[in-house]
Amino acid sequence: MNRYGSSASGRTRSARRSTLVAIAALAAAGAALAGTRLAGSDEPSTRTAGPTRNLAANRFDAGRAFRFLRWQVQLGPRPAGSRASKRLAARLRAELPNGSYQPVPGGLRNVIGTVRGRQPGRVVVVGAHYDTKDLPGFLGANDGASGTAVLLQLARSFRPGDVRPTLVFAFFDGEESPRGTPDAEFELRGLRGSKIASRALRHAEAMILLDFVGDRDLALPRERGSDEQLYASLRAAARRLGTGRYFSGTSELFVLDDHVPFQRAGVPAIDLIDFAFPCFHRPCDNLTAVSERSLDIVGETMIELLRKL
Ligand SMILES: [Zn+2]
């Protein structure tokens, strides 16, 4: 994932600077306590603390999702092409409904699962990247494991015919650009798996990307480049469920992420990403940065959205 400002000239090369811009924008909107977030506190935040039992529905097994997040982190760093990454891919393929590999150049592989809908000609893609940034010791509990965990649990939550569209669960390899490549070349060198998947799925009517969805202090405003109508449907689902406060507002920032190749292929797409994550590509992106409750908020809201499409 890479971020850039709202104007073409405002494009920033420094991810750190972009992070601060994002945090400043959120703080200005009164949505977050920037100081608290920057401190990287291990304490659960008050905004995402407490049970989710008061929601209008309880269909997502967040405990199971969180156990899978923890299993991924225990594999250690999982950069594209690594042994740990291959082990993760094998488990995804085994556990997914109709799980299969989709080859990606460079010896990489996407993992794809499918649940047939009542209107099987309609296709909705839900995606996440399962590789981690190739930095020494980087565990990617939020950046990598959280989206992967919610996505696998979503795939386990639907039986054929449960919803109208056919659901394609796409786990992208090689989202992160290879070690040593500059951030400015992210679009060229990264997004490797989603570039391949978007070609095969260009007939899809919608694509929803899950990235950075485990942040303890969860806030998922509309990413500036994300489809307004699709985000409005998500927000409506969240309001019906009781999670509306986590899905509100629009960020000042555009995010370059796995949804972009789909958009370029003509598929309306949204990126659910918590931009204001203080541990972006830092060692503190570990189990202390994420919470089961955040996975639950995203998982429950996604089930409510997919049931209404
Ligand atoms: Zn990343």
Image (spheres, grey):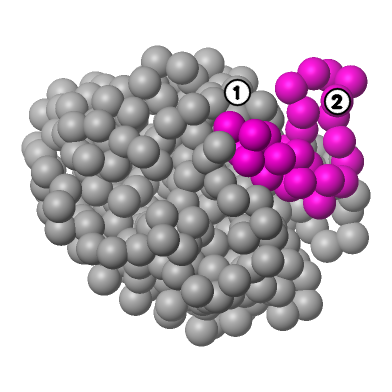
Residue found at x 77% / y 28% = 5
Front: mark 1 or 2: 2
Q: Check the image and report above or below for 13 versus 226.
A: below
Residue found at x 43% / y 79% = 71
Mark 2, other Cα within 10 Å: few <14 / some 14–19 / many ≥20: few
* SS type, badge 2: helix
Image location of residue 293, percent across then percent down: 33, 62
> Is 257 contained in the magenta span?
no
Q: Amino acid at mark 2?
A: Gly
Image location of residue 204, percent across then percent down: 39, 24
| Magenta stretch, residue numbers | 3-29
Query: Residue 96 — which label?
Result: none
> Is 15 contained in the magenta span?
yes
**Residue for badge 2:** 10
Q: Check the image and report above or below for 237 versus 275.
A: above
**Residue for badge 1:** 225
Q: Amino acid at mark 1?
A: Gly
Residue 261: image quadrant is top right
Who comes first in sequence, dot 1 or dot 2?
A: 2
Image location of residue 272, percent across then percent down: 48, 40
Q: Is any atom of residue 283 visible in this view?
A: yes
Q: Is residue 154 left or right of residue 59?
A: right
Q: How many marks?
A: 2
Residue found at x 34% / y 76% = 67
Foreground of the two, 188 or 12: 12
Q: Is residue 42 left or right of residue 188?
A: left
Distance from Cα at disc 1 to Cα at disc 2: 15 Å
